[in-house]
Amino acid sequence: MILINKSKIKKVVVAYSGGLDTSVILSWVKEHYKCEVIACCVDVGQGDELEGLNEKAKKTGASKAYIIDAKEEFVTNYIYPALKANALYEGRYFLGTALARPVIAKKIADVAKKEKADAVCHGATGKGNDQVRFELAFKALISNVKIIAPWREWDIKSREDAINYAKKKNIPISVTKTKPYSSDANLWHVSYEGGILENLNKEYDNTMFKMTISPENAPNKPTYITITFKRGIPIALNDKKLQPVKLITELNKIAGTNSIGRVDIVENRLVGMKSRGVYESPAATILYMAHAELESVAIDRDTLHFKQFLSFKYAEIVYYGLWFSPLRQALDAFINSTQKYVSGSIKLKLYKGNITIVSRDAKYSLYLKKLATFEDDEIYNHKDAEGFINLFGLPTKVSSVLRRK
C-alpha cells in the first residue's frame, strides 16, 4: 500500500451515505488525519435514507455537507446504456451498485475540485468490489488527488468493531449487532449481503425486503403493462410518456407489488472470492426482458448474436469498475448503432413473480409472417434448402470422409 503523508492532507472529501461505515469514517478521518472533512452524499434514489444527513454529517465531524441530486443523470447516463447493452453480470445481476459507483465518484470528484481538496475518501472494504470502482473512477477523473481507504488502514476489522466505535464516539447509527447485514439502495435496486446472509444454507428473511412483496402476498389477479421504447430507451409506461426517473419509480412500484425482481445469487467478486448477494431489481427485471424481446424482433440475426456476446463483456467491464475506460466507450458506439431500429412496444403480464410476454409491436420489425408461416406461401422455395444444406454442411462432410480414411 502507498503510504500517504498525513501532514500534507488538509482537506478531505468523504463519500458519505449516513450508514455505519461512512459515519464512523467521518469521525475517524478527522481524528486520524487532523484535517478538515467535507461530507458528500450523492442522491441516486436512496429515498428516506437521505433525511437529516446534512445535520448528521456535521454532528459527526464534517465542516460542510453536500447533498447532490444525481438521479436523472444516473438513469440517463448510466442505467440506460447498460439497459441498451442488456448487461447482466454472470447472467443474473443487474449491476445496481456497480452502475451507481461511477456517477457517485464523478460528483465527489467535482466537489474535490471545487473545494481544492487534497484527498478523497470512500468507505468500501478491502474485500469488496466498490474499492476498485471508486478508485479507478477517481484515477480517471482526479488523478492528482490522494485516495484514503480507511478499511485498509484502521484497526477496525468487522462491522461489530465499527458499531462499538460508533457507540464510543456517540455516532448515531441504524445497524445493530442482531441485524448486521449490509444494504445498498438506489433507483435501480436494493442489495443485501454479509452478516446472516453469509450462511449459504439459510433462506433469506422476507421481512428485510424494501421494494418487493413475497409471491404468497402478491395479487391473485395478473397485472398487464405496456413498455414503449424509442431507439432502445424506454419512454412510456402504459402509453403514458414519463421522464426517466418517474418511469423507473412507477415500474418499481408495479413490479414490486407483483413480486417481480428478487434474486439470490453467489457471485464472483473482482477480488477473487465468491460472495452471496440478495437483490431486489423490480423495474430492471421488467425493462431488460421487454428490451431484449423488442430486440429479438427488430435486430438482424448476426448483429443480435454478436451483441449478445458483447453484453457479457459490457457487464464485466461495469462490474470491474472500468466505466470510464476507452473500451466501454467504444462498446457504447457499437451498441448505440444497434439500437437504431429498436422502437416499439412490448406488453407483459405480471403474476406472482412471473413475467409473460403478451404481445410485440416493433416499429421496424423484421418478422415477416408470410415467410415464417408453416402454411402455404409463395415466397419461400423449400427446394432451395437442399443446396443450402449441402454447402453449409460441406466442411463437416469433408472432415468426416477424410478423417475416416
Image: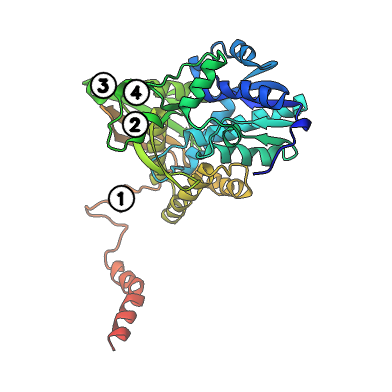
Horizontal and vertical percent position of residue 13:
68, 26
What amino acid is found at the position of numbered circle 1 in the picture?
Answer: Lys
Residue 318 falls left or right of residue 195: right
Quadrant of residue 112 within the rendered picture: top right
Q: Nearer the viewer, residue 120 or 312?
A: 120
Q: Which residue is mark 3?
A: 218
What amino acid is found at the position of numbered circle 2 in the picture?
Answer: Lys
Q: Nearer the viewer, residue 232 or 351?
A: 351
**How far is mark 4 from mark 3, CA to CA?**
9 Å
For numbered disc 2, what is the local secondary structure?
Answer: strand
Q: Residues within 10 Å of mark 3 (few under 14, many from 20)?
A: some
Disc with the residue nearer the chain's start (3 vs 1): 3
**How far is mark 2 from mark 3, CA to CA?**
20 Å
Q: Quadrant of the C terminus?
A: bottom left
Q: Which residue is mark 4?
A: 212
Disc with the residue nearer the chain's start (2 vs 1): 2
What amino acid is found at the position of numbered circle 4 in the picture?
Answer: Thr
Disc with the residue nearer the chain's start (2 vs 4): 4
Disc with the residue nearer the chain's start (4 vs 1): 4
Residue 139 falls left or right of residue 340: right
Horizontal and vertical percent position of residue 70:
59, 24
Q: Which residue is mark 1?
A: 370
